[in-house]
Amino acid sequence: MLPLLLISTVPAFTLLLVAPATKPCCKLARELGLLVLLLATELLRHATTAGRRLRGRGREPERSATTMPATPRPRPAALAAPGEAEAEATPAAAGLPLLDLPELALDRVLEELSPASLAAMACVCAALRDRCSADALWERHLRAKWGRVLGATARKEWEAELGARVSRASAPRPPRRRSWVDSLACAWPFSWIACRWLKGDATPAPAAVAAEPAPAPAPAAPPTNTVAAWYRALECGEFWFPAQVYNREQDGHVGFVLSCYDAHLRYDRRTDTFTARYPPHGRKPAKEEAGVQWSRIRAPPVGTPAHELHASECLEALRPGDHFEIQWRKNKDFPYGWWYGVVGHQAPCNPNEHLCRCHQDDTIVLEFQHYAPGSRWRQTSVSRKDHRETGDETDGFYGGIRKLQTKDEISTWRRFWPVDVLN
């Protein structure tokens, strides 16, 4: 009877729904028609579920009257064959729960897992989720893969990102505009229909909930303030971290050879490369470079921002032959970049190490040997006693100096040495 009533009233309600909504009376008629259609649909679903429940109750006596087949009893171990006894004992031995292992053994097992396996293990249960999200496990993976490109600045920016997320989550949302449907839902006898109307059919009806088992809740994600969450944000490219890039724009710009500039980078795990976003240069907009390899990235060795002068603390110790990095920028609106060079000798100096007195001079000669002799970029000099930013708009401005202390730093710079000498 109910399906026939629904079929007979559908054409009339369809005409109401397609009526123009320019007049208030037509708009009200359309909303009322849609509400009646929703009510009829829910009543039909409720009647169908109740009928299935009644039919299921009528079949229960028939099922209880039928005899269940007896399950075969296992034979005693003395009567069983040797092969069968081993087969029966093997699953019991293999079914040892992982959480029943001693603490040290379980920690050792989790330490051997890869990051992907560790993340999958965290989805098994709540106990393993807590263990697999421990900072001690993920710190090792973070150092192994990201330690060479992450510095103290990256951690500070990640903590600032977490604070911004908390602020956005706790910010008050604008109040929802109350309509006549909200008022109707307060007194409507079928509150579950009102929930479907207001929530976009996201809440199932009580009859459906009783008839169908509820799905198991999804495992909760690790807290955002853990190392596991930081690793995931880096791996999925959700966090732009600060670092420095050697030879920026190397595909089409030879003017950045043997330089290292600050940038924010995002990882692309499909290509195992990075996208670098450089700060704007003066009035020029920020540039992005895709396909940056791991070998071209380093963590900032000092905490000096790109627009500030680095304090040179190594001037007294510089000798001819020492390797250094120096800040340089084209004009005062540009950020600094770090450029590689070698300390040279004074013009009248004897380069013999026993006769050289350049380390006693107040002037330090800085050479950039990847430029040809005679080039204006080949050589410059700075004051050993009172060095500050020097230069002009033509040759650029030289800033702070940092002496390279390790062979690894020097070999990294030498790896980017150009094939041809620059002019």
Image (tube, rainbow, N blue to C red):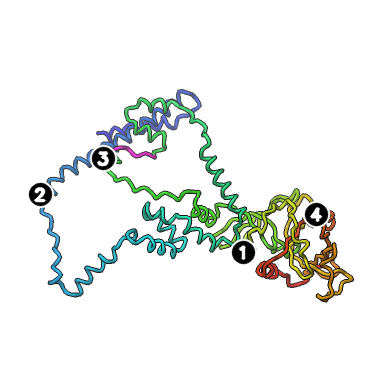
> Are the residues at dot 2 and dot 4 in contact (C-beta closer than 8 Å)?
no
User: Which amino acid lies under the numbered mark 4 shown in the image of this protein?
Assistant: Glu
> Total of numbered circles in the picture?
4
The circle on residue 65 is 2
- Left or right of 198, for residue 355: right
Residue drawn at the location 62% of the way across and 64% of the way down: 293
The circle on residue 389 is 4
Cα separation, mark 3 vs mark 2, equals 26 Å
Viewer-proximal residue, 420 or 100?
A: 100
Secondary structure of the residue carrying tag 2 is helix
User: Which amino acid lies under the numbered mark 3 shown in the image of this protein?
Assistant: Thr
The quarter of the displayed image where residue 310 is located: bottom right
Label 4 crowding class (10 Å Cα cut-off): few <14, some 14-19, many 20+?
some
Q: Is residue 253 visible?
A: no
- Left or right of 82, for residue 377: right
Label 2 crowding class (10 Å Cα cut-off): few <14, some 14-19, many 20+?
few
The quarter of the displayed image where residue 377 is located: bottom right
In the image, is residue 82 part of the stretch drawn in magenta? Answer: no
If you read the primary sequence from the N terminus, does the residue marked by circle 1 or circle 3 appear first? Answer: 3
If you read the primary sequence from the N terminus, does the residue marked by circle 4 or circle 3 appear first? Answer: 3
Give coordinates of residue 365: x percent, y percent. 83, 65
Secondary structure of the residue carrying tag 3 is helix
Q: Nearer the viewer, mark 3 or mark 2?
A: 2
User: Which amino acid lies under the numbered mark 2 shown in the image of this protein?
Assistant: Ala
If you read the primary sequence from the N terminus, does the residue marked by circle 3 or circle 2 appear first? Answer: 3
If you read the primary sequence from the N terminus, does the residue marked by circle 2 or circle 4 appear first? Answer: 2
Viewer-proximal residue, 158 or 195?
A: 158
The circle on residue 293 is 1
Cα separation, mark 4 vs mark 1, equals 32 Å
Please state the extent of the stretch shown in magenta in the rendering: 202-206
If you read the primary sequence from the N terminus, does the residue marked by circle 4 or circle 1 appear first? Answer: 1
Cα separation, mark 1 vs mark 2, equals 73 Å
